[in-house]
Amino acid sequence: MAKTILAVDDSSSLRQMVAFSLKAAGYQVVEAVDGQDGLDKAKQQTVDLVLTDQNMPKMDGLSLIKALRGLPAYQKVPILMLTTESSDEMKSKGRAAGANGWLVKPFDPQRLIEVVKKVIG
Amino acid sequence: MTRKKILGSHVKRLLSGVSDHGRRHLNEVETDLVQTNLLLEEAIEKLTGSFMAIHQVVGERQDAINRLLAGEAPSSEESARLTGMSGEIGQHVNSAITSMQFQDMTSQLLDRTLRRVSGLREFLTTLSEHGADIAPDSHSEEIVERLGKVSMALAIQSLELRSMLRKSVEQRHLESGDVELF
């Protein structure tokens, strides 16, 4: 059965490109338009991996990670940040919040798939 | 200090505050617009390259299909080339996907620019509103008090705007970013 990835980003074009790349590699993708939407969708259906942007309206990526880590079903689920943010300070905050990795945009689809495969197979 | 000197010092502080604030924001606006332009130029160049390359491979594949349909037997070289075409198209599509992410970055830069411009407009509005409250026959004490208030209001607005506008896009090229697993 295909593994499911929750892709959270407020940019619709970015979500489309992430979904296109992941679906082409055989993954199922659930899309969310911001952190709050991501949290709601994560509660409806437990996914195998969360890929989230940082700067979004309503709820940002770090807040989403903290909220997810507070849910029993998401304590071990890998969470990757995919963001334009590249500072060490932000990466440290992501790590402290419970992120398992940090990918700086723009992403290369092949590289993204390699990382996803490494994390969830 | 004489009243005249106190008034002069307040006027000086206000003028230099307005100038510093305005210049700082306009410099950031200029930097963000230059960065936006760089990203757009590179995106258009790379996307054009990707689409042309895809068009060429698709055309070559169609030619090969046409020859096969006409009953020609493909050479081993042509068979290998046909097999590799999907992968080649995939590489160009991947490259186009990386370039298309300019929209995400430039929209963040433009949003920041708009917020700065709007912050600057609010700053000038504050200046104008306080200026309108100064009557032509005001005493220098009143003017000093008013100038102190406007300087304080502008300093607060300036700080609020700066704290709200942390830069989140440093990219100046559309090359794939770093990956770090924790």
Image: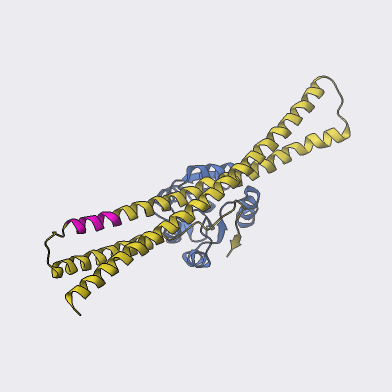
Q: Colour of chain A?
A: blue
Residue A28 visible in rendering:
no
Q: How many marks?
A: 0
**What residue is at 73 percent from the left and 29 percent from the top?**
B59
Where are the magenta residues, as a range? B123-132
Q: Position of residue B15 (x, y in %)?
A: 30, 64
**What residue is at 17 percent from the left and 68 percent from the top?**
B145
Q: Is residue B67 above or below residue B97?
A: above
| Main secondary-structure element of the magenta-colored stretch | helix
A96 or B25, nearer to the observer: B25
B14 or B70, nearer to the observer: B14
Q: Position of residue B83 (x, y in %)?
A: 78, 36
Residue B87 is left or right of residue A36, and the answer is right
| Chain coloured yellow in the rendered structure | B
- The quadrant holding residue B41 is top right
**What residue is at 18 percent from the left and 56 percent from the top?**
B132
Q: Is residue B131 magenta?
A: yes
- The quadrant holding residue A60 is bottom left
